[in-house]
Image (spheres, rainbow, N blue to C red):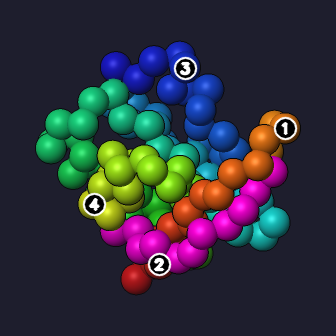
Amino acid sequence: MITEKQKKALKGKLLHLDNDIGISLEDLHGSAFCHCQVSKGSPSILRRCKNIAQRLLEEHKRDVYAICKVKDTLHKKFLTFMGFKFENKKWISAQGSDKVVEIWRLERC
């Protein structure tokens, strides 16, 4: 079950929400950034999440991006499974702290 904390992490326009999966798109500087929450990382939920994300990507007819912390290997594994490709690293200043993040891109087919 998606928790209230996970629901709050879905920023921007909510595109899909059920008991196991939440997906939203946030428009930042003309680019669409995807936020995805899953209740647990079971293979069936992850496959369903990937299918839903692919369908939504086709409906919105644009590439989407994701931000990942440099050392977050679990998130990178999830992004790779979802079909995202590493694009570049970027230095950002957010909430009073500076950090480097990775930008990942999912191209529409």
At x 41%, y 74%, the residue is 85
Q: Find numbered disc 4 in the image and state the secondary structure of the residue it sits on.
A: helix
Q: Are marks 3 and 4 in contact (CB under 8 Å)?
A: no
Residue 88 forms part of the magenta stretch: yes
* Dominant SS type (magenta): strand
Front position in the image: 61 or 30: 30
- Answer with mark 3 or mark 4, whichever residue precedes in sequence: 3
Bounds of the magenta span? Answer: 82-93
The amino acid at mark 3 is Lys
The amino acid at mark 2 is Glu
At x 66%, y 40%, the residue is 11
The amino acid at mark 1 is Gly
Crowding around mark 4 (Cα neighbors within 10 Å: few <14, some 14 to 19, many 20+) is few
Q: Could you tell whether 54 is left or right of 47 in the image?
A: right
- Answer with mark 1 or mark 4, whichever residue precedes in sequence: 4
Give above or below for 25 relative to 4: below
- Using the numbered discs, state the Cα–Cα distance from disc 3 to disc 4 in whole angstroms: 24 Å
On the image, the x and y values in percent for residue 47 come to: 21, 51
* Residue position for label 3: 5
